[in-house]
């Protein structure tokens, strides 16, 4: 979970991935209101320049979006991007298919309908 101070020792490429996931989790954990780079750096313990690179990379992949601050600050706020909703919807459909298969199996074994 973001900001728990977990120290991970990993090869550089894995550490980069870990940093990206840490920033993404920090975006999720703030009720989707968004956070500035400074706030994300504080929440993750990462250097603000590293956080800036991460959020720009996430934005390029649809995982984060940059928005103006609602408070009038010049510092941009980063929010979770549309990629989350696309993956969430895909996962929901997958789980519903699995549930329907279990319901069908239950009915075949017991003769009872769960619906």
Image (cartoon, rainbow, N blue to C red):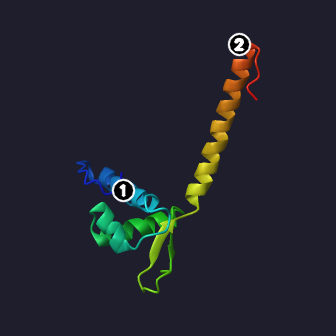
Residue 73, quarter of picture? bottom left
Tag 1: Cα neighbours inside 10 Å, few (<14), some, or many (≥20)? many
Whole-percent x, y for residue 57 in the image: 44, 65
Would residue 17 appear left or right of 66 to someone viewing this image? left
Whole-percent x, y for residue 94 in the image: 64, 39
Tag 2: Cα neighbours inside 10 Å, few (<14), some, or many (≥20)? few
Whole-percent x, y for residue 102 in the image: 66, 25
Residue 24, quarter of picture? bottom left
The residue depicted at 62 percent of the width and 54 percent of the height is 86
Which quadrant holds the C terminus? top right
Residues at circles 1 and 2 in contact by the CB criterion of under 8 Å: no
Residue 5, quarter of picture? bottom left
Disc 1 from disc 2: Cα separation:
45 Å
When the figure is inspected, residue 99 is found, relative to residue 40, above or below; the finding is above
The residue depicted at 71 percent of the width and 30 percent of the height is 100
Q: Mark 1 falls on what kind of element?
A: helix
Q: Mark 2 falls on what kind of element?
A: helix
Q: Which residue is mark 2?
A: 109
Q: Which mark is residue 22?
A: 1
The residue depicted at 50 percent of the width and 74 percent of the height is 66
The residue depicted at 51 percent of the width and 77 percent of the height is 67
Q: Nearer the viewer, residue 65 or 35?
A: 35
């Amino acid at each position: 979970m973001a900001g728990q101070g977990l120290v991970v020792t990993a090869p550089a490429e894995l550490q980069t991935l870990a940093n990206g996931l840490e920033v993404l989790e920090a975006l999720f954990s703030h009720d989707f209101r968004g956070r500035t780079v400074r706030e994300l750096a504080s929440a993750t313990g990462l250097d603000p320049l590293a956080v800036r690179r991460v959020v720009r990379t996430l934005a390029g992949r649809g995982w984060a979006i940059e928005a103006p601050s609602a408070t009038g600050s010049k510092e941009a706020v980063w929010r979770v991007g549309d990629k989350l909703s696309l993956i969430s919807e895909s996962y929901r459909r997958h789980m519903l298919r699995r549930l329907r298969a279990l319901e069908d199996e239950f009915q075949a074994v017991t003769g009872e309908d769960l619906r």
